Amino acid sequence: MTSPSIETSAAIDTSPSITDTRGRPATRAGWFRLAAERIAVVAAAIAVWELAARTVIDPFWISSPSLVGVRLWQLAVSGDLLWHAQATVWQALLGSALGLVCGVAIGALLARYSRVAAAVDPILMGLYSLPRIALAPLFIIWFGIGLLSKVMMVFSFVVFIFLLNTMQGLRAVDPDLVDLMRSMRATPAFIARRVQLPSILPWLVTAARISVGLALIGSVLGELLGANRGLGWYVEHASGRLDTTGVFAGLVALMVIAVALNTLVDLAERWLVPARP
Amino acid sequence: MDQSVRSDETGAATGSAAGRRGPAARPRVVLEGVGKEFPSSGGHGLTVLDDIDLVIEDREFLSIVGPSGCGKSTLLRLISGLMPPSRGRVLVDGAVVTGPPPDVGFMFQRDTLMPWATVAQNIGLGLELNGTPKGAHEARIAELLDLLGLAKFRDFLPAALSGGMRQRVALGRLLAYAPALYLMDEPFGALDAMTKMAMGRELLRIWSRYDKSVVFVTHDIEEAVGLSDRVVVMAAHPGRIVSEYVIDLPRPRDFRAVRLLPEFRALCETIWRDIGVE
């Protein structure tokens, strides 16, 4: 689908707005300014941390940006960083993919059969609200301490997000638009592809955005409970040796991964959901 | 896609305009003792339509007027096969309606455009669904955009258009689908008076050019009389037909100038009286 959004909005809305409807900068200059501001905030946080570690708080407790930087560099050079990050990201992606497929499928079925949806609602909400960490011991019994238990832990977080968003998204589809298509003898498959799928895309992007954080939680949680690899395992291992620099190095790596994954979702959104009112 | 349906229509001269103009042309739509009830909280169903008999001829422009709640929109949905009648039967082109029949197009009061698709893509939907070969889409879309004065907006999204323009896109989609019967449910109901006048004029121009049957639901009596060959007046609770007027004002008509004729005024007055507003 070609996106005429740029010409359109330029033709219609000529007001000198700094950001577009999604809060992104509308001009190149605005974009540079925002980037500079973001870098400044990160730099300030690092400076405060470094200063605190050098003056008031012993680095034993909070390490310091320079120590963490050196450690990350060493881990990167030795290949350990990639080794651990790969495991964590891979588990998160596999679990998310499984959660997306199952969540969308079940959500679509429940949207279609509203009586079933009403009947299973309490159990669904119960499972959704269950603290997933309480499931961890069970998952280890069921799926062992290998890849599968981590993937399933991620899945248990992510599947509900896609399920609920798909269900809500499909219920919000304009019924008149569906009737119009039906009156022109469109097949259910055609309506699914041309009305329902585009209608729920923004809902799925939202679900993906929520899932990024949850998938990392699931992946790290799985590693904390039993693993020999992964950033969660590395953090756990470092804290066992009172190595706060190691702990912070793991946490920083996780943060960077989370930001990167969020950026991917942003790009996917721009590609999948062209400008909307 | 609808060759089979067209071919049983006249026997010879399959699908051609000449064939449909023949004196033996059968009515486009027949409603026989049609009733519709919706379930209501009181246990008894709410009767929305009661015992409707109505015949819509080929190439006829028929309007249905009546107060809100008289079931005029429901009537269109029954003809379009979007919902089944509770009693009686509906025939379109001689076949009992059990689902959306071929060759019937619908236009709602709301434009019901795909918000994520451009003007051209929204109009193109009609071509996709009537089986027009892909190669012919581009030319037909351009033709319709010209006809409706939308050429400059072909790549706009609906959100960037005014209500009147969006409704013109919806009309373009209907014309692209090219059904033999147009079902129009207050298509100009949400538009301002000036846009409404322009759209009415456009519809008359297009109808006289394409030669199709139209069932036009409205609560605007002047609009109904100005457009139609025949006006059916309905009343509510339960929805029923109370009277019917043949509008023999001259054609081609100017949608605005026709309002100055004394016959026009007299017809409108009579219909107002039927509805119970003096």
Image: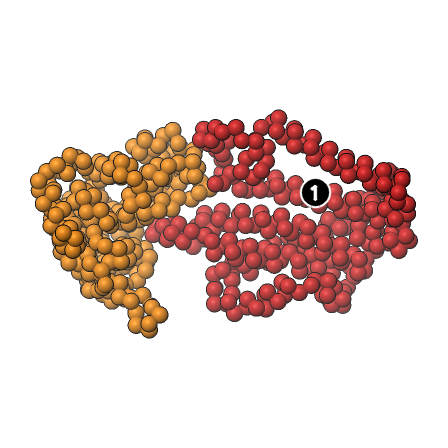
Q: Residue furthest front?
A: A56
Chain that is coloured red in the picture:
A
Asked whether the viewer can see residue B213, the reply is: no
Residue named by callout 1: A259
Question: Which residue occupies 15% across, 38% down?
Answer: B259
**Residue B249 percent across, percent down from the top left:** 11, 41
Q: Is residue B99 left or right of residue A153?
A: left
Q: Colour of chain B?
A: orange
Judge the density around disc 1: few (<14), some (14-19), many (≥20) Cα neighbours within 10 Å: few
**Residue B46 percent across, percent down from the top left:** 29, 67
**Residue B96 percent across, percent down from the top left:** 25, 60
Q: State the image quarter where residue A75 is shown.
A: top right
Q: Residue furthest top?
A: A29
The amino acid type found where label 1 is placed reads: Val
Asked whether the viewer can see residue A275, the reply is: yes
Question: Which residue occupies 59% across, 65% down?
Answer: A125
Q: State the image quarter where residue A158 is shown.
A: bottom right
Q: Residue furthest bottom?
A: B43
Taking depth in this image into account, of A246 and B56 the one nearest to the observer is A246
Q: Is residue A93 left or right of residue A78?
A: left
Name the chain letter of the residue that bears numbered label 1: A
Q: Is residue B179 left or right of residue A177?
A: left
**Residue B194 percent across, percent down from the top left:** 27, 36
